[in-house]
Image (tube, rainbow, N blue to C red):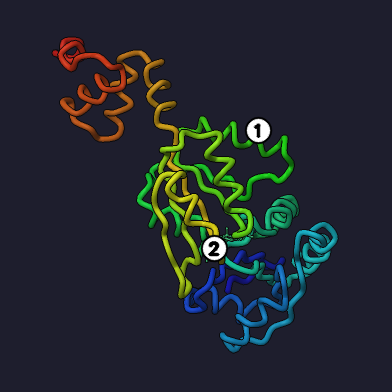
């Protein structure tokens, strides 16, 4: 562990189901810090017991974030090393963490992330939907107006979209998505990742909807981006910009010409003539 006059704030990722998914470094840090700030101490104690770690804990959750932040900063300033953990996965990702990180930066306190599980990343990498570019939206707002606005925004995103959802709300969310997105958009529902009932349900929104009635457990939705929007956007580029766009993706001249012709709905030869000497 690093020696500093002031303490260090460690952001420690913990398992999202399978307790074996904890890194050696995370265990080392949890053993060495002076204090663990946990979203729910009753939850984290199970992990600590499993790891045979005994350490003072303090709660740090949505409802006490502000005043607890002040206390933790004071402790850090006095030289205590603190590990922040959430109930599952990576702190700060749809979980408390952002506030204390911002405040620590203001106070010149060193922050060290300790990488580990994150539901959205694991859902994404196993989804089969593009991992090249993606937008994470966390949980959709519940407020009707905000939700509608967010769905309208999502509709036009030309990158993979990631949502977190609770099992009792998944049907409603898929119905909202069906009403606003092209119903043939590919969706993957990743459920109970790293647990016994881990499952990836793949299909269009229409195909997935009838399968979610009885679904339990934790889930992530991975939604294919709006590629039509991307194609329209590409058509707004100059032909040279369009060429460079694909060139940057490592495509060769023949492939680029084919892609541009498809995007612009013109004959390949027309595009070929423009780039004959390129
Ligand atoms: N910080 C966490 C992370 O790094 O993924 C996310 C916390 S957020 C409060 C909880 C949500 O994450 C759940 O409602 C679910 O959408 C998703 N999630 C967490 N664990 C999961 C798992 N094992 N399988 C699928 N989704 C999971």
Comparing 34 with 62, the one in front is 62
Q: Position of residue 100 (x, y in %)?
A: 73, 57
**Residue at the image position 77 percent from the left and 71 percent from the top:** 59
Q: Answer yes or no: is residue 71 visible.
A: yes
Dot 1 crowding, Cα within 10 Å, few <14, some 14–19, many 20+: few
Establish whether ligand 1 lies closer than 8 Å to the Cβ of label 2. no
The disc label shown at residue 149, or none: 1
Query: How far apart, in angstroms, are the residues tagged by discs 2 and 1?
Result: 29 Å
Quadrant the N terminus occupies: bottom right
Residue 59 versus residue 209: which sits nearer the camera?
209
Which residue is at a point 81% across and 60% down the rendered structure image? 63
The residue labelled by disc 2 is: 214
Dividing the image into four quarters, tell me where ligand 1 lies: bottom right
Eyeballing the image, is 14 above or below 239? below
The picture quadrant where one finds residue 27 is bottom right
Please state the horizontal and vertical placement of residue 189, each as a whole percent of the image.
Answer: 47, 55
Q: Which SS class for mark 1?
A: helix
Q: Closer to the N terminus: mark 2 or mark 1? A: 1
Is there CB contact under 8 Å for labels 2 and 1? Answer: no
- Residue at 50% x, 34% y: name it: 181
Residue at 72 percent of width and 72 percent of height: 40
Check the image and name the residue furthest to the right. Answer: 67
Left or right of 87 on screen, residue 162: left
How many numbered discs?
2
Question: Which numbered circle lies on residue 191?
Answer: none
Q: Is residue 246 left or right of residue 72?
A: left
- Residue 273 location (% of width, % of height): 16, 10
The x and y percentages for residue 14 are 56, 70
């Amino acid at each position: 562990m690093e020696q500093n006059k002031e303490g260090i704030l460690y952001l420690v990722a913990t398992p999202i189901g399978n307790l074996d998914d904890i890194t050696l470094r995370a265990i080392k840090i949890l053993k060495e810090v002076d204090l663990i700030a946990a979203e729910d101490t009753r939850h984290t104690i199970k992990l600590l017991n499993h790891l045979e770690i005994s350490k003072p804990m303090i709660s740090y959750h949505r409802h006490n974030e502000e005043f607890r932040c002040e206390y933790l900063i004071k402790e850090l300033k006095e030289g205590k090393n603190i590990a922040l953990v959430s109930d599952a996965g990576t702190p700060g990702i749809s979980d408390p963490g952002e506030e204390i990180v911002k405040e620590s930066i203001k106070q010149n306190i060193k922050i060290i992330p300790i990488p580990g599980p994150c539901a959205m990343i694991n859902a994404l990498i196993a989804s089969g939907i593009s991992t090249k570019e993606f937008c994470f939206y966390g949980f959709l707002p519940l407020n009707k107006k905000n939700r509608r606005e967010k769905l309208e925004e999502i509709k036009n995103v030309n990158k993979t979209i990631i949502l977190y959802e609770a099992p009792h709300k998944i049907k409603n969310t898929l119905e909202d998505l069906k009403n606003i997105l092209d119903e043939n958009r590919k969706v993957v529902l990743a459920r109970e990742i790293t647990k016994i009932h881990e499952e990836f349900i793949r299909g269009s929104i229409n195909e997935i909807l009838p399968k979610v009635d009885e679904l339990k457990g934790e889930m992530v939705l991975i939604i294919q981006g709006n590629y039509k929007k991307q194609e329209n956007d590409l058509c707004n580029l100059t032909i040279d910009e369009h060429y460079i766009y694909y060139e940057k993706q490592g495509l060769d001249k023949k492939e680029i010409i084919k892609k541009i012709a498809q995007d612009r709905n013109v004959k390949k030869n027309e595009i070929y003539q423009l780039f004959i000497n390129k």
